[in-house]
Image (spheres, coloured by chain):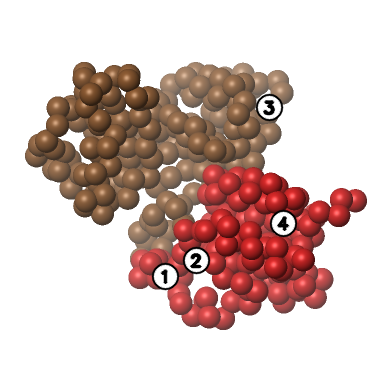
Chain colours: A red, B brown
C-alpha cells in the first residue's frame, strides 16, 4: 500500500474538488472525491481517508451532519475533518445557522473563498 | 432512442436553479462585450453564474447567466443603453446542466452533443472548465436533457440539484 496520505475532498462544486485534488496531488497526497454527503460516507467506508476536506452547504446531506457523524462514530472519529464554510452570508436565506457552526465537531474551519496555500499548510500540519 | 452499447461512467450531473440568459454581440471585434457585461453586473452586485465568450480577435460575443430573479433588472440595465455598440439578446428561463468530470475527453464532448442533439433540446451555450462540461438549455427541459445523456453515460440515479431554503426560495449556485 502507498505510504502517501489519503485526503477525501467533498464539495458539490466539481471544479473546486478538481482544483483542490490537483493541488494535493502536486504535494504528494493521494486523493478521493465526493460530491455530496451521501457519497462522502461511501468513500469514507471504502477508503478510510486520513483527512476529509468537507464543504458545509451540500445537497442530500450537509457537511455539518457528515462531520458530526464521523466524529461520533468510534470507527472513524480519528479522521481529521476540515470544514469549508461559506455559511455566514447565507444564514438569512437558508436553513443553515451560526449555531450549526459553533457546535460542529470539526478539527479546523476554513472560510470560502479558499486560500489554497493556506489549505495545504493545514492539511500538512494535520497529516505530518 | 437506442441506448449506447457501452455507457461511459461519469461521477455526476448537476442541474442549476432557474437562470436568465444574456447574450451580447458586436460586429466589431474591438468592442469588448465580455468586460462590458461583467462591469454592468458587478456594478449592480449581480452574481454571474455562467460566462463564456469568443476568443480575442474573433467576433465579439459573450453569453452570461444570472439568477432568474434579476431578469427585469438586467434587461432594464442593458436596454437602457450601456455605452457601447453591442446588441443584447435574452432567453427568459434557462438552466445550466453540468456534466463531470470531462477528463479532457473529446468522446465525452461528442457523445454529450449527440445525446442532446438527438433529444431535440436546445443548446444556447456551452463551455468547459477544469472538470465540468456545461450546457445551457431551457429550464423546463433540464430533466429531459438529463434523461437523454443517461442513454450514453453511466450516471448516479439522481442529479445534484440546488437545495431549497426553509422559505422555499432557491439558494445561489455556489456554496
**Circle nearer the viewer, 2 or 1:** 2
**Image check: A22 left or right of B134?**
right
The label shown at residue A88 is: 1
Residue at 81% x, 54% y: name it.
A4
Distance Cα–Cα, label 1 vs label 3:
41 Å
Distance Cα–Cα, label 2 vs label 1:
9 Å
Residue at 52% x, 76% y: name it.
A101
* Sequence-wise first label, 2 or 1: 1
* Sequence-wise first label, 4 or 2: 4
Q: Which chain does tag 1 point to? A: A
Tell me whether circle 2 and circle 1 mark residues in contact (CB < 8 Å): yes
- Give the residue number, with chain letter if any, for mark 3: B7
How many marks are shown on the rendered structure? 4
**Image check: B47 left or right of A4?**
left
Distance Cα–Cα, label 4 vs label 2:
19 Å
* Sequence-wise first label, 1 or 4: 4
Q: Which chain does tag 4 point to? A: A
**Image check: B25 left or right of B130?**
left
Towards the viewer: B59 or A10: B59
Distance Cα–Cα, label 1 vs label 4:
26 Å
Residue positioned most to the right: A1
- Give the residue number, with chain letter if any, for mark 4: A7
Residue A92, image x, y percentages: 35, 70
Image quadrant holding the C terminus of chain A, namely bottom right
Is A70 rendered above or below residue B7?
A: below
Amino acid at each position: 500500500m502507498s505510504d502517501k496520505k489519503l485526503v477525501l475532498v467533498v464539495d458539490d462544486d466539481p471544479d473546486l474538488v478538481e482544483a483542490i485534488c490537483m493541488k494535493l496531488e502536486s504535494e504528494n497526497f493521494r486523493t478521493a472525491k465526493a460530491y455530496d454527503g451521501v457519497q462522502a460516507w461511501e468513500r469514507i467506508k471504502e477508503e478510510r481517508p486520513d483527512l476529509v476536506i468537507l464543504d458545509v452547504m451540500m445537497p442530500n446531506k450537509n457537511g455539518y451532519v457528515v462531520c458530526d457523524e464521523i466524529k461520533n462514530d468510534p470507527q472513524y472519529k480519528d479522521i481529521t475533518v476540515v470544514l469549508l464554510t461559506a455559511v455566514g452570508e447565507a444564514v438569512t436565506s437558508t436553513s443553515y445557522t451560526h449555531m450549526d457552526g459553533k457546535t460542529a465537531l470539526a478539527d479546523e474551519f476554513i472560510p470560502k473563498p479558499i486560500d489554497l496555500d493556506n489549505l495545504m499548510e493545514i492539511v500538512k500540519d494535520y497529516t505530518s | 432512442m437506442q441506448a449506447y452499447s457501452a455507457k461511459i461512467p461519469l461521477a455526476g450531473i448537476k442541474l442549476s436553479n432557474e437562470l436568465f440568459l444574456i447574450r451580447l454581440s458586436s460586429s466589431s471585434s474591438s468592442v469588448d462585450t465580455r468586460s462590458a457585461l461583467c462591469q454592468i453586473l458587478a456594478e449592480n452586485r449581480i452574481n454571474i453564474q455562467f460566462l463564456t465568450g469568443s476568443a480575442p480577435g474573433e467576433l465579439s460575443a459573450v453569453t452570461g447567466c444570472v439568477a432568474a430573479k434579476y431578469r427585469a433588472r438586467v434587461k432594464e440595465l442593458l436596454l437602457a443603453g450601456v455605452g457601447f455598440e453591442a446588441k443584447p439578446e435574452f432567453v427568459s428561463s434557462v438552466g445550466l446542466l453540468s456534466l463531470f468530470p470531462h477528463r479532457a475527453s473529446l468522446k465525452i464532448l461528442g457523445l454529450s452533443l449527440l445525446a442532446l442533439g438527438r433529444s431535440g433540446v436546445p443548446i444556447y451555450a456551452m463551455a468547459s472548465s477544469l472538470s465540468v462540461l456545461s450546457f445551457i438549455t431551457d429550464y423546463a427541459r433540464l430533466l429531459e436533457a438529463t434523461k437523454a445523456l443517461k442513454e450514453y453515460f453511466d450516471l448516479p440515479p439522481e442529479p445534484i440539484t440546488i437545495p431549497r431554503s426553509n422559505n422555499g426560495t432557491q439558494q445561489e449556485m455556489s456554496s
